[in-house]
Image: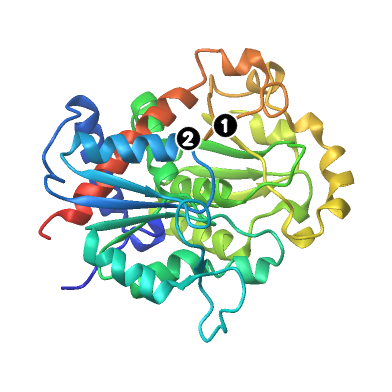
């Protein structure tokens, strides 16, 4: 039997994404089930988590399954991922053994592994989760690496709940200031899912240095072409916000400065005015606002925006629970 993983939504057709969202909506109406009865999932956290861990553990429980949480390098042995490595450093076991042994124990493996922020040419290969998928004999789920597909589904479900059809709705993915350079994962994923849903997407960022990796820009253009939407880049705040139906905020580091963040800092610090505030939201078409969370208030968005009826960030966060159940149930169907 061919193993189906959930590593990126680009591996899933629009109809498959719609089916997952429909199943998630059903779980939201009726949270309990037995789709994972007698099944187990290993949740591998190489990085911290609050919503992801909670929603996956509870999701497995709600569907009759059991989750095992492991933090390699903390409560589990540190893992080596390089092929042919002479393991005379800190790592104690190789992914070739880890993934195959876990596959004998559990029915699903989920992985959260952020970039190391030293060399984008290396990090963009997404080696950790790809290695799990290579060696595992059970389905592997991406809990955030250089993309965040579960967040994508939660975001799409929240937008559909408030707007109905998303076709050709104006969607603004805006960079916002943060005192630290952050992963591009959520930004990559927001671009993927908004274009996959046929929205008219504007990527708003301070300078061309903040445009996302060409891989995701090309996926976005392809998705837009296939689903009747559009994708453009803007550095003009007023133009981007005007008439927007959805504003999605995220901070991310500029890839040309990847690993050299002190050189990027003056550019980042010069664009604190990209904060999402009432004046900018007033330019929208009574637009919705959201963020993946966690969010630094009055840095990324003001209190007034976060506390307004237009903010659907809590709805999106809740939906993580429902969409992840849908993903786990779909991967277990027929196994």
Which sits in the foreground, 188 or 135?
135
Q: Check whether the beta carbons of the residues at disc 1 and disc 2 lie within 8 A of each other.
A: yes
Which sits in the foreground, 66 or 17?
66
Q: Is residue 166 in view from this perspective?
A: no
The quarter of the image holding the N terminus is bottom left
Residue 82 drawn at (x, y percent): 54, 78
Name which residue lies at 20% across and 25% down: 29
Q: Which mark is on residue 294?
A: 1
In this rendering, the answer to whether 11 lies above or below 34 is below
Compared across the picture, whether 36 is left or right of 124 comes to left
In this rendering, the answer to whether 49 lies above or below 273 is below
Residue 187 drawn at (x, y percent): 57, 47
Compared across the picture, whether 106 is left or right of 178 comes to left
* Marks 1/2: CA–CA distance: 9 Å
Q: Is residue 225 in view from this perspective?
A: yes
Q: Earlier in the sequence, mark 1 or mark 2?
A: 2
Quarter of the image holding residue 237? Answer: top right
């Amino acid at each position: 039997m061919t193993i189906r993983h959930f590593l990126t939504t680009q591996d899933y057709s629009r109809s498959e994404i719609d089916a997952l969202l429909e199943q998630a909506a059903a779980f939201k109406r009726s949270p309990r089930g037995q789709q994972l009865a007698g099944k187990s999932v290993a949740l591998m956290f190489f990085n911290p988590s609050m919503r992801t861990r909670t929603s996956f553990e509870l999701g497995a429980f709600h569907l009759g399954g059991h989750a095992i949480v492991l933090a390699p390098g903390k409560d589990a042995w540190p893992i080596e991922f390089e092929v042919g490595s002479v393991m005379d450093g800190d790592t104690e076991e190789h992914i070739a053994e880890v993934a195959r042994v876990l596959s004998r124990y559990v029915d699903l493996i989920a992985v959260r592994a952020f970039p190391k922020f030293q060399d984008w040419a290396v990090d963009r290969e997404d080696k950790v989760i790809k290695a799990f998928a290579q060696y595992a004999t059970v389905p592997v789920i991406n809990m955030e690496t250089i993309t965040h597909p579960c967040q994508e589904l939660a975001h799409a479900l929240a937008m559909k709940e408030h707007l109905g059809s998303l076709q050709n709705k104006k969607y603004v993915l805006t960079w916002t200031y943060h005192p630290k350079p952050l992963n591009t994962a959520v930004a990559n994923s927001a671009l993927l899912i908004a274009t996959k849903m046929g929205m008219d997407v504007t990527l708003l960022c301070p300078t061309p240095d903040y445009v996302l990796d060409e891989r995701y820009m090309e996926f976005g253009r392809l998705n837009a072409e296939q689903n009747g939407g559009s994708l453009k880049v803007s550095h003009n705040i007023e133009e981007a916000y005007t008439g927007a139906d959805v504003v999605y905020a995220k901070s991310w580091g500029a890839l040309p400065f990847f690993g050299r963040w002190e050189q990027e800092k003056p550019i980042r610090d010069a664009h604190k005015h990209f904060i999402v505030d009432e004046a900018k939201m007033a330019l929208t078409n009574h637009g919705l606002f959201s963020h993946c969370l966690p969010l630094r208030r009055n840095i990324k968005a003001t209190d007034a925006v976060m506390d307004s009826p237009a903010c659907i960030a809590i709805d999106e966060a809740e939906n993580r629970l429902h969409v992840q159940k849908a993903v786990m149930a779909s991967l277990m169907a027929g196994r």
